[in-house]
Amino acid sequence: MRTFLALGLALAVWGAVAAERVLDFRDAPLNQPPPGFRSLLSGEGAPGDWRVILDEVPPLLAPLTEKAPVVTQRPVLAQLSRDRTDERFPLLVFEEETFSDFTLTTRFKLVAGEVEQMAGIAFRLQNERNFYVIRASGLGRNLRFYKVVNGERSPPIGPQLEVPPHVWHELKIECKGNQIRAWLNDREAIPPLGDNTFNSGKIAFWTKSDSVSYFADTRIVYTPRVPLAQTLVQEMKAKYPRLRGLQIYTLDAQGEPRVLASANEQERGEPGGLSEKGAITEGHIYYGKGRKNVTVVMPLRDHNGEPIAAVRLTMERFAGQTEQNALARALPIVKAMQARVRTLEELTE
């Protein structure tokens, strides 16, 4: 499936100062939910009806000439369900990335709704019962921040202001550490406020009740999160500088091993072989030797003792090298890594 997400990385992934995700629906099928997202429902009522539709959207930049079109028709994301349930909060979660520190900008339009006319962004989302949200209300004439913890909403924070329907507005959210800020149409509406409940999580589009709301031009500039696997590799390589190579493999969606983390970051995503697959699926240990190096592949186990990944270690061969002493050299490294890992999710996030 061709992705409709434009991804721009400002710098190399793990050494990056900032990366960027642009959520662009131009290549998504019309009248269908966009791929790469998952629909959730917070509260009660029917799930959201999220689809990509065509709508007229003004350009982000001012026209260069008076003859340039003021608006263009292009794909946008729409929540179309009109279920009037009061405590109903449809969410469309972007599944392909987890965010900690970020700056998000999006445009939204309040189109219809008798009970509510709202649109917003949920962030640092753990699940449908735990997240932050900043949302605008046309009928309530306000912008509000609140958090949801175990399904319970905190008291809302934010100003009264006009959010007229049928026009596009820009919402900007900045999240750094425990500091959260928001702007509406280039004016700061929520000054810095602090909360330590959620450190990272998913980002989702959000509406309430029977709100029909559109979203477009969503851009997320963020600090990439380093998976625990890569941190472990970097720490072990620093502690054991004579290691010639160190990789951690996990299984991809097709059940094949691929490099999750490596001392050589350019190897990320490269396929593994039968030894890595056997270590993950069967818990087997493999040994191989070359003219100058020896290689050991061992399973990395979770807190229940189940193999969840494979560690491949390449070490310098010395005179009298045997399989037994190669395994003895590799085992403390793998055990040190394993002591830091409880689940596959912890390893990959």
Image (cartoon, rainbow, N blue to C red):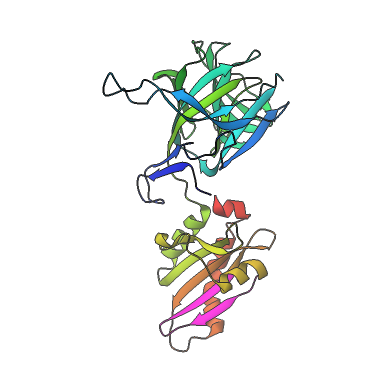
On the image, the x and y values in percent for residue 96 come to: 53, 45
Q: State the residue at coordinates (48%, 56%).
A: 230
Q: Which residue of the protein is positioned furthest toward the left in this rendering?
A: 65
Confirm whether residue 157 shows in the render: no
Q: Residue furthest front?
A: 67
Along the line of sight, the residue nearer the viewer: 100 or 28: 28
Residue nearer the viewer, 168 or 337 = 168
Asked if the magenta segment contains residue 212, the reply would be no
Q: Is residue 254 above or below residue 43?
A: below
Task: Count numbered badges in the picture.
Answer: 0
Q: Is residue 175 above or below residue 239?
A: above
Q: Is residue 254 left or right of residue 321?
A: right
- Quadrant housing residue 145: top right
The residue positioned 70% from the left and 18% from the top of the image is 84
Residue at 49% across, 77% down: 295
**Horizontally, is 31 left or right of 41 in the view?**
left
Q: What span is colored magenta in the figure?
A: 283-298
